[in-house]
Image (cartoon, rainbow, N blue to C red):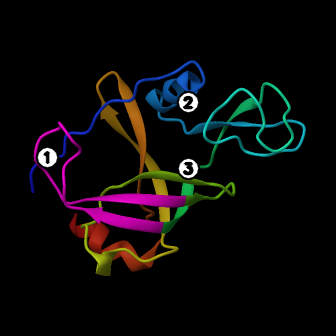
Amino acid sequence: MDEIIRPAPIPTPETRLFWEAARDRVLRVPRCEKCLTWVFYPRPFCPKCGAADPVWTPLSGRATLHSYVINHRPPLGYGSAGPYIIAIVALAEGFKMMTNLVNVEPAPENLQLDMELQVEFEDRGEWRVPVFRPAESDSRTAEVHSEG
């Protein structure tokens, strides 16, 4: 399988702290101090109660697989490679995010919904991007994880 070349993020004022934390291998997301809602995607106000300036808070990095697609086409303009896994993961803190799964062969028999995942970070230019891999404790992925 060819190496997959993916684009680097372009931080905005609202997302810069997210990307700076990821560069330091920390998954950090704003949380409203007033109603305790996680604010993801990052923005300067709480989408639930409207409070300003949520506080950037580190996350556990644990998640479960909510949904996925195995993509056989490369990102437009970024070479030829594939397949790779695009996933929606449910973070332990209670919200979902889109990401990529790594360290698991991209085949349906290796991807079980609700499988336990752990964050890791993939270099993309001067930044790092959070991706997820099967957690060591998920016995359903132990054989696949040890081979790949």
The image quadrant where one finds the N terminus is: bottom left
Residue indicated by mark 2: 18
Which numbered disc, 1 or 2, marks the residue that appears first in the sequence? 1
Q: CA distance from mark 1 to mark 2?
A: 26 Å
Give the amino acid at mark 3. Answer: Gly
Is disc 3 surrounded by few (<14), some (14 to 19) or many (20+) residues within 10 Å? some
Residue range highlighted in magenta: 67-89
Look at mark 3 in the image and give the residue it sits on: 61
Residue at image coords 37%, 74%: 111
Vertically, is 147 above or below 11?
Answer: below
Badge 1 density bin: few <14, some 14–19, many ≥20, Cα 10 Å: few
Residue at the extreme right: 34
Looking at the picture, which amino acid does disc 1 mark?
Answer: Glu
Among the two numbered marks 3 and 2 on one chain, the one whose residue lies closer to the N terminus:
2
Check residue 3 in the rendering and tell me which mark sits there, or answer none. Answer: 1
Can you give x and y, in whole percent of width and height, for residue 127 in the image?
38, 26
Image coords of residue 27 (percent x, y): 55, 39
Where 78 sits versus 68, above or below?
A: above
Quadrant location, the C terminus? bottom left
**Pointer 3 and pointer 1: residues touching (CB < 8 Å)?**
no
Query: Considering the numbered disc 1 on the image, is that residue within a helix, a strand or a loop?
Result: loop
- Residue under the image location 79 percent in, 46 percent down: 37
Type of residue at label 2? Phe
Q: As displayed, is residue 123 above or below residue 80?
A: above
Determine the secondary structure under disc 3. loop
